[in-house]
Image (spheres, rainbow, N blue to C red):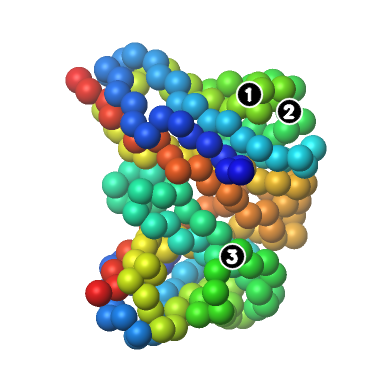
Amino acid sequence: DAGVTQSPTHLIKTRGQQVTLRCSPKSGHDTVSWYQQALGQGPQFIFQYYEEEERQRGNFPDRFSGHQFPNYSSELNVNALLLGDSALYLCASSLGDVGASYEQYFGPGTRLTVT
Amino acid sequence: AQKITQTQPGMFVQEKEAVTLDCTYDTSDPSYGLFWYKQPSSGEMIFLIYQGSYDQQNATEGRYSLNFQKARKSANLVISASQLGDSAMYFCAMREGPNSGYSTLTFGKGTMLLVSP
């Protein structure tokens, strides 16, 4: 049973560029949440996708956008990259419409460096 | 105000000893959940233990137990018989609102635990 997978593992971009990060949820999960973890900090919630729509959003600018595909995989896009966007980006999956499930399964993350 | 506070940036413990990692939280929602995650240097967040706000007993999972003091709004993680492999960052996190797969988590800043031989 495959867990949450993310690609790429590492990425180096230049200020002003655009980046796309990818996430495949755990088998059977339909909800994907994205978190940003700056160095020395805890993860911060960016947004969540369910049924191909953004269901919830944290306090992040519109430069951060996402998408969910029919197979539940998801992409995180960041436009006009800033140095402050350098972070570990974590994807977490869960089963949205269950209620009793409390676990979110995290992927290994994508480490983005903006120079 | 911070919703999750972890006051210990770093903790040191000798192998086989017990260690307590502190976490206090702030919420006005009567229904919430508290989580502890371990993050090794590889980056993946590993779920350790969960405590619901209505749970009567403290949660336990193997060597991990959660010391839940609701009135004090604290949810400390206790690791018994520390092992070298326990060296990692530990995060306390909270879900506000009823249990749901749509829940999002608010994390503290973490505590780095180093276990020495």
Q: Callout 1 environment at 10 Å: few (<14), some (14 to 19), or many (20+)?
A: many
Q: Which residue is mark 3?
A: A59
Report which quarter residue A10 is drawn in.
bottom left
| Farthest residue, direction top | B17
Amino acid under label 1? Answer: Phe
Per the image, label 2 sits on a secondary structure element best described as loop
The answer to whether dots 3 and 2 both sit on one chain is no
Amino acid under label 2? Answer: Asp
Percent x, y for residue B7? 46, 31
Q: Which residue is mark 2?
A: B55
Distance between the alpha carbons at the discs numbered 1 and 2: 9 Å
Nearer the observer: mark 3 or 1; the answer is 3
Residue B68 - label = 1
Amino acid under label 3? Answer: Asn
Report which quarter residue B116 is drawn in.
top left
Mark 1 falls within which chain?
B
| Most foreground residue, B79 or B20 | B20
Mark 2 falls within which chain?
B
Nearer the observer: mark 1 or 2; the answer is 1
| B40 left or right, relative to B108 | left
